[in-house]
Amino acid sequence: MPAKIPATIVTGFLGSGKTTLIRHMLQNAQGKRIALIINEFGDLGVDGDILKGCGDEVCAKDDIVELSNGCICCTVADDFIPTMEALLARNPAPDHIVIETSGLALPQPLVRAFNWPGISTRVTVDGVVTVVDGRAVQDGQFAHNIAAVDAQRAADDNLDHETPLSELFEDQIACADMIVVNKTDLLTADEADSLAAQLRTDSRDGVQVVKTSMGALPVDVLLGQGIGAEADLESRHEIHHHHHHHDDDADDHDDDHHHDHGHDEFESFIVTRDEVADAAAFAAQVSAAIKANNILRLKGFVAITGKPMRMTLQAVGPRVETYFDQPFGDAPRQTRLVVIGEAGLNQSAITAALQA
Ligand SMILES: Nc1nc2c(ncn2[C@@H]2O[C@H](COP(=O)(O)OP(=O)(O)OP(=O)(O)O)[C@@H](O)[C@H]2O)c(=O)[nH]1
C-alpha cells in the first residue's frame, strides 16, 4: 500500500494570520507539491484570491480548492470528503495537503473526518497548526488561561457564561499539535515570551509553541510533524460541541445543517460600494465603523479612483491594513467587503457607514 499522504490542518481565530502563514509556506515550498483546501467564513473568497494572486508558480490556481458552502466542520460529508477524494484522485497526487479552516471552525470534527472509510487508508493528519493573534490574546480578546477556565467549568455546569469566542479559541488550542504565536511584531519580547509560556501550560503535553511574525516559519517546521492526529482524538477534547453536528452517520448529515453560516453565533454579510476617492480616509472610515459596531473581521477589495490596481483591505479588530495587490483586470471595478462579527450585527448601520 502506498504511504499515506500527510495533511496539515491550519486553524486559528479570524484574522490570526493563517493565510499569511500559508502564503509564506507556499513561497518557500522548494518544489513540494502542496494542494490547498481553503474554507472561508463569508463567501467573498478573499483568502483564495490572495493566495492565487501571489503570482508565484507554486500557488497554481488548480492546486487551490475553495469550500464555500459553509463551515468545514459542519459540512464534512457534503463538501470536505468529496473534495479530498478529488484531490486524491489526481495524478500525480499532491505531496502534502494543507487545509486552512475558517477562523470560526472547530478543528476536531475535521480531524475526525480523517477516520472516514476511504479517507483513513490514504491520508493522515500530519499535524494541527493553530495560529494565534498574539496581540489580540494579549489584549484579552479571548480567554487564554485554559486551565483556569476548565477548573471553573468543572465546578459549574452552566456553560452559558462562556462566550462563543473564548470557546472557539479553547477548542483550537486543545486540538493543536503546534501553536504559532503570530504577530510578535506587535508585542514586546516579554509579552511574547509570557504568552508562549502561558500557551505551553494551557495546551496538551508535547505541543510545540513557536513565535513568529507574518507566519514566517520554515516549511520544515510546519510540515512533516508526523503526528497522525486522527488516531488521538480523545486527548483533543472539545468544549464547543453543543452547537454542532458531527455525526459519523452519513445518512443524516443533511438534516439540520446551517449551510448559510455554519455557526449560529456568528454572522457575515457583504457590503459593496462604488469607487473610493481617498484610500487613507476610507481606512479611517472603516476603522471607525469597526469600533462603533463590534466587528471582528472585515476584509475585501477596494476600487480607488484613478488606480488600476485593486486595494486589498484587511481589518482585524480595530487595526486596518491596506495594500495594492493586483490590477482589477476583467473583474468589475467594485468595492466589496465581507464583514464578520458575532450574531446581531447592525447590518444597516454598518452598510451605511461603509457606503458613506
Ligand atoms: N502586524 C502583523 N500583521 C499580521 C501578521 N500576520 C498577519 N497579519 C495581518 O493580519 C491580517 C489577517 O491576516 P490573514 O493571514 O488574512 O489572517 P487569517 O487568519 O487567514 O484570516 P481569516 O481567514 O479571515 O480568519 C492581515 O492584514 C495580515 O497582513 C503579523 O505577524 N504581524
Image: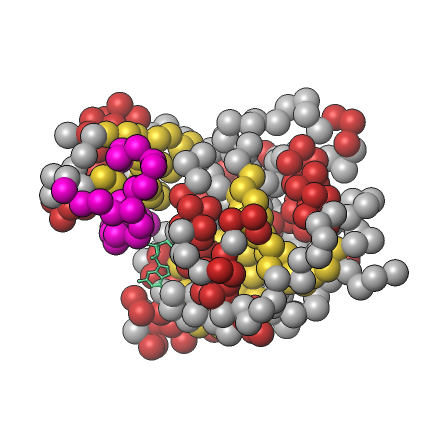
Visible in this render: residue 199?
Answer: no
Residue 41 placement (x, y as % from top left): 47, 39
To which quarter of the image does residue 352 belong? top left
From the viewer's perspective, tell me whether residue 67 is left or right of residue 279.
Answer: right
Q: Is residue 170 magenta?
A: no
Name the residue: 34% across, 36% down.
Answer: 331
Magenta stretch, main secondary structure, is strand
* Ligand 1 falls in quadrant: bottom left
- Marker count (numbered): 0
Name the residue: 29% across, 46% down.
Answer: 327
Residue nearer the viewer, 156 or 179: 179
Residue nearer the viewer, 48 or 262: 48
Visible in this render: residue 303?
Answer: yes
Residue 249 vertical position relative to residue 133 in the rendered view, above or below: above
What is the magenta range?
Answer: 306-335
Residue nearer the viewer, 126 or 63: 63
Residue nearer the viewer, 11 or 342: 11
Residue 326 placement (x, y as % from top left): 31, 50
Residue 39 vertical position relative to residue 12 in the rendered view, above or below: above
Residue 287 placement (x, y as % from top left): 21, 44
Tell me the quarter of the image containing the N terminus. bottom right
Residue 160 placement (x, y as % from top left): 50, 37
From the viewer's perspective, tell me whether residue 71 is left or right of residue 15.
Answer: right
Name the residue: 71% across, 57% down.
Answer: 92
